[in-house]
Amino acid sequence: MYDIFRKSPVLLNNNKILLASFGVFLVFLVYYLWASSILPQGAGPDYRSNNEATAFIFNHHRLAVLPDDEQQVYFTSHGGTRTLRPPLSYIVSAAVAQLYDTESEKKRFIAFRKGSALLIAAAVAISFYCFFVLSQSPFLALLGATLFGLLPQVAFIASYNNDDSAAIFSATLLFTFMVITYRQGLTPFRFAQLGIATGLVILSKFSAWLIVPFVLLFIAYVALTTLRPVQWARYSVLALVMVIIGGGWWILFNIYHYGIDDPLAMQIQQDMVDKHRRLMVSQAHGFAAINIGFRGLWLDNYRNFIGESLKSTIGNLDWLRLRVGNLQYVFYQSIFAIAMLYYVFRLADFSYSGLRQKLDKKNIRRFIFESLLFGACVFQVFMYTWTNIHNDIQIQGKYLLPALMAVLILFFMAWDTVYVGLRGKWALFQVKSIQITSKTLYRGIVVVAIAGVVAVHVDALTNYVIPYYKPPLYDVKLSGFQPIKYKDLVAEKVNNLKVNRQRSEIRFTSTGDDPWVVWSSRLCRYIKGNTLLRLRLNTAQRGIFRIYVDDGGGFKEENSLKYTYKSGDEEIVFPIAFKKCHRIRFDPALGPSSVVIRDIAVSRMLIRARR
């Protein structure tokens, strides 16, 4: 299926595939626009910084120049401003917002989100086209697009204003032209396309820049092995011009305003930080400040760095406050693992074939293609880790998403390898006198897989995302208070406390500091699920009554409840909701005291979400 020298008749229907890609774009755009409309106003990391950068372009129809526009630019407490960052996402968001009603601040806030929705929807459509060119199958292309566009983190990025959307879009476009080059070779038009895509990467975000060397290495390899030197030299000049048009002009813009020694606006950014910093921080940043390096993070997995990074890549959303479920994590981690393990086996197979001198040009070209994809993934992870070590600790897997396409391409290369291996073994299946060919069965499997991806996303949306932002209303029903039988109040252990039990009351008299009593497990029989524990006290002085619940790990501070009572008669109600209860401890006071419990009772709480 990935034979680069085999011309596919499906390519003749390129217009149909472009139309299908546009359909995918519309479907995902509608979904992302809806999500951006209902997401709460404060959702999304750094939303104010992103909105202020967009607002400047929206109001002035140009990029900011510092220090000339210093009074009109928003600076964070650390002194930074996003108006000096690569501006693709902010330009798109400002342009799209012109189509919306922005009279009020809230409406403008929502309008600024639409640019990210547009960029990610375009990236999904581009991924659909990429996977079709790779696999020659519209079914697999749709599966790839759903895997890409319904990744919880990607969908979340599409729902609020940010610059990661531009990084994902531009990286996806560049990987797509890499795949097209792999399948169809190089032409002058392809060089122009690659130039535009590279320029857009420059204009997007630094995290997307990391993939450029690997794509360009593959383009150089194909050019040197298929084109004459005069051809690729002439085409390279064309590509360079298109790079400048696509986004390289931003570097020229910085050189013009800030000097040739500051093409990325790093020095002016540092000058602004030094001038506008309001929150002073220590000079030590990252894991290096605590002597943790690559070994500690990768080999020792310090603080579960690997697991947390994977989870945040898949879906630990909104400042790492919103986790999705194990279903989403296991599903996408399996895909990532298959892609990486495939390359390991591919490397072993290629090495073995090389030793046996059974390598041809097609095999070599495919291996180089896969190796550069794998290298792009590894380098992205390396730089992400390096940044956490030497810069700021940000366990934000969204910085790895520009390499998502490389992972999915390797996954589908693995898919194809398995399919080719099984295709020869599949025969006709007889099901109630209806013959199902291997081709039909294969398409059915892909359709089921697409439905599975959608189901995984819907599960995350309905069970985690929506309840987090819009928690449902609950009905709470209470049963009547039932008295606890005094025979079930058996003191197992006491400390600095005398316990006198009478028919209608329990008297506690402390004999020292930190008085407490541990009741037998009989009391736990009354504490099931959500329970209210009511105590009616009579005390001679003010004090603190504390209850500890042992859930199997001993009496801990986090498993305790306390109430400050006054002298005289007092009624206390403790809400208890522990999954396990082994024993319960009462601390009726902190020091010398006398407390009488005249009544102790429990009530069951039934909590149900409204339908």
Image: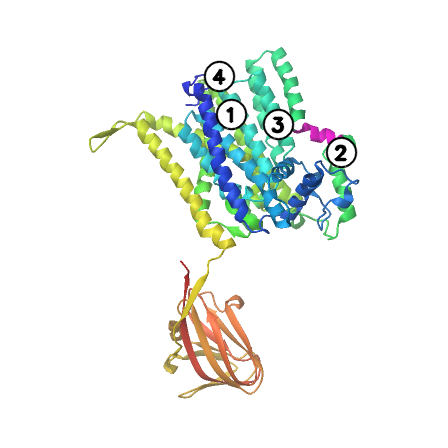
Q: Which mark is residue 198?
A: 3
Amino acid found under the numbered disc labelled 1: Val
The local secondary structure at tag 2 comes to loop
User: Marks 3 and 1, how far apart in space?
Assistant: 15 Å
The local secondary structure at tag 1 comes to helix
Q: Which residue is mark 4?
A: 361
In this picture, which residue range is highlighted in magenta? 247-255
- The percent position of residue 513, horizontal first and vertical second, equals 57, 80
- The percent position of residue 566, horizontal first and vertical second, equals 57, 82
Q: Which mark is residue 262?
A: 2
The local secondary structure at tag 4 comes to helix
Q: Which mark is residue 179?
A: 1
User: Marks 1 and 2, how far apart in space?
Assistant: 34 Å
User: Marks 3 and 4, how far apart in space?
Assistant: 27 Å
Amino acid found under the numbered disc labelled 4: Lys
- Mark 3 or mark 1: which comes first in sequence? 1
**Residue 306 seen in the current view:** no
Secondary structure of the magenta portion, mostly? Answer: helix
User: Marks 3 and 2, how far apart in space?
Assistant: 20 Å
- The residue positioned 56% from the left and 23% from the top of the image is 218
Q: Quadrant of the C terminus?
A: bottom left
Above or below, 604 against 463 in this view is below
Confirm or deny contact between disc 4 and disc 2 (CB under 8 A): no
